[in-house]
């Protein structure tokens, strides 16, 4: 009888551990904590008047997000002192602009992520309405073409 009780007890513990394991896996995979969209530049060249437009569908207003701009570039030829303007059009019709001076690492410099540059656009921003949110990114470089730019992304992460 005691052997049967021990067997049942061990099986219950295993079942509880399995349920806990499944719970932690599922909570780690919850969608909606991070959204991103990327625009890739053909031939690693950003033409002066080529303004990438990146779209998001906001379906849960009132959630606070941290927003980032991430630029991926050819580490062997990074664009130096690269000015951009990020225009954000919210679902409520509001337009916000931010000028950014991107300063990539020069060849040979130590970086945490060679070939990528990430900058904060906004911290703890909440959308007031559902709908389409559009980001337009303008190059303000004096050059006609900026070589070495692979892609540009906008990332929305739920604020902690």
Image: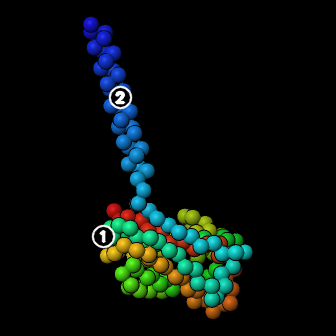
Seen at 63% across and 89% down, the residue is: 49
User: Please, which residue is most extreme toward the bottom here?
Assistant: 142
Q: Earlier in the sequence, mark 1 or mark 2?
A: 2
Per the image, the residue denoted by label 2 is: 15
Which circle marks residue 48 in the picture? none
Which is nearer the eye, 76 or 143? 143
Query: Residue 69: x percent and y percent?
Result: 50, 74
Residue at disc 1, secondary structure: loop
Q: Position of residue 13 (x, y in %)?
A: 32, 26
Residue 113 at least partly seen: yes
Residue 66 visible at all:
no
Against 76, residue 100 (above or below) is: below
Label 2 CA crowd tier, 10 Å (few <14, some 14–19, many 20+): few
Q: Is residue 8 above or below residue 106?
A: above
Is 107 left or right of 85, judged from the image as shown?
A: right
Residue at image position (40%, 53%) is 30
Q: Is residue 107 above or below residue 26?
A: below
Q: CA distance from mark 1 to mark 2?
A: 38 Å
The quarter of the displayed image where residue 64 is located: bottom left
Q: Quadrant of residue 129?
A: bottom left
Determine the residue positioned at 27% across, 7% down: 1
Q: Is residue 29 left or right of residue 15?
A: right
Percent x, y for residue 92?
Answer: 36, 81
Q: Which residue shows up at 35% across the image and 67% down it? A: 60
Mark drawn on residue 62? 1
Position of residue 126 relative to residue 81, above or below, is above
Q: Label 2's element?
A: helix
For this rendering, which residue is in front, 113 or 33?
A: 33
Q: Within the image, what quadrant is residue 79 found in?
A: bottom right
């Amino acid at each position: 009888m005691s052997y049967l009780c021990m067997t049942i007890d061990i099986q219950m513990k295993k079942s509880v551990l399995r349920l806990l394991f499944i719970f932690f896996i599922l909570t780690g995979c919850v969608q909606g904590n991070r959204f991103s969209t990327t625009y890739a530049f053909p031939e690693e060249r950003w033409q002066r008047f080529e303004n990438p437009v990146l779209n998001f569908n906001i379906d849960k207003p009132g959630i606070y997000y941290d927003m980032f701009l991430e630029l991926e570039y050819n580490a062997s030829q990074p664009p130096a002192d690269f000015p951009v303007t990020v225009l954000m059009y919210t679902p409520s019709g509001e337009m916000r602009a931010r000028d950014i001076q991107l300063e990539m690492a020069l060849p040979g410099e130590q970086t945490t992520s060679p070939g990528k540059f990430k900058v904060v656009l906004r911290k703890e921003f909440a959308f007031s309405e559902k709908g389409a949110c559009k980001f337009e990114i303008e190059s303000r470089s004096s050059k006609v073409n900026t070589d070495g730019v692979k892609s540009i992304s906008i990332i929305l992460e739920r604020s902690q």
